[in-house]
Image (cartoon, helix red, strand yellow):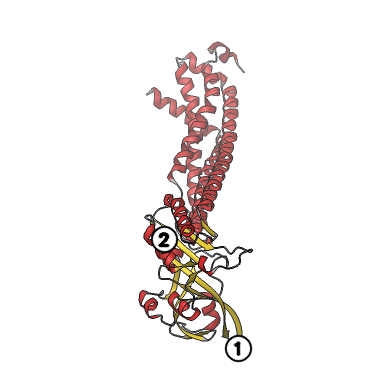
Amino acid sequence: MLARETWRVAFEALWSNKLRAFLTTLGVVIGSACIVLVVTVAVTGRRYVIGQIEGVGSNLVYANYEVNPQQGLVMSNEITLADMNAVKAAASNVVAVAGTRSMPQTVVTGGIERSVALVGATEGFQVIRNLRILQGRFLDSEDMESRSKVCLITDELAALAFPNQNPLGASLRVGEISFTVVGVFQERVGTFGLSEIQRYTVLVPFPLMQYYSGDNSIDALYAQATAPERVSALTRQVEALLRGRHPGGTYVVQNLTAILDAARTIGTALTIVLLVIGFIALLVSGIGIMNIMLVTVTERTREIGIRKAIGARHREILYQFLIEAILISGVGSLLGILIALAIPVVVRPLLPGDLSVPVPWTSVVLAFLVACSTGLFFGYLPANRAAHLPPTESLRYE
């Protein structure tokens, strides 16, 4: 009964000063919503950036032959299909390997000659580079074995060469050779021309490129590790294998681990900074709770004296004012969390199609606990002051 009475008195005290309680609660609403949103933004942003980097190629290691300006091109040092097969056979932590060779060519569209990148690719290139097939299919083993004159083209080249028509099955003349288009593709994550995939690119079977060029060298060798933690070891293995097979060559063997680590570090730092901002907002609201409660204690000094005179104990007075502080912070945190949960739903139609904004449940729990703890911490001083007021002095207070 005493506990129920304490809760009733605390609620009635807040209800009698609705505007003051609302303004104090508003600070907690903003602070708790801020915590949920900043954690959500940080986690979503970190996941999106890492996903974009991994979209170039998951667990990817890539190598290329670097021409020494003093020696010039040494054909015996170029990476070959034999090197690619050796990597696949020797590396225990590799899932797939692939190679490409590019050369500039031209196509004539609408009576205009345009430059394109003719890229010979081995069978595993699509899997390693995460290419998105928009229409048709990728090059298969039969195309490789028979050196079929088939090709895949980028979506931009398809729109340019075959406007308002289905490019599948159509003939595309590249240089002196005509190819049948069997697929249209795009990079899952654009590399802005920094890879072999350019704006206008034609992918053909590598054996066909090898047959017409008379050269079995590879411009870029790709290897996919079994897991992210195996990428560094695979990088060292590929570099050692290439240097062992071509002692005089200079090779650049790289991976995306450094970029991924940098993205994770930036994401963590961003999360910390945004959380600090959220905690500052809650700190300000906590100070507001303390100030309002101190004013409330001063205004209700006579009421406290009367309650003590009729038998209210120190603990009951303390609990009454603590409950008021917890009600303000608890209700404020719940309202702030609801607002924070609603905002991602509202802005979802405005975001890119592949970007989702899940709200981490940990941010909801964190916001609620921190907001309630803030109210309890900053409400204790006014509550303790009210509980220690002498009854005789309180009754004489005007």
* Residue annotated with mark 1: 111
Q: Quadrant of residue 301?
A: top right
State the mark number for residue 87.
2
The answer to whether 291 is drawn above or below residue 146 in the figure is above
The residue closer to the viewer here, 277 or 145, is 145
Q: Position of residue 23 (x, y in %)?
A: 58, 38
Q: Position of residue 244 (x, y in %)?
A: 46, 58
**Amino acid type at image mark 2:** Val
Of labels 1 and 2, earlier in sequence is 2
Residue 19 visible at all:
no
Looking at this rendering, what residue extends furthest in the right direction?
70
Q: Position of residue 219 (x, y in %)?
A: 52, 68
Please state if 17 lies on the left or on the right of 356 as rendered: right
Quadrant in which the N terminus is drawn? top left
Q: Are marks 1 and 2 in contact (CB under 8 Å)?
A: no
SS for callout 1: loop
**Amino acid type at image mark 1:** Gly
Residue located at (49% from left, 63% from top):
353
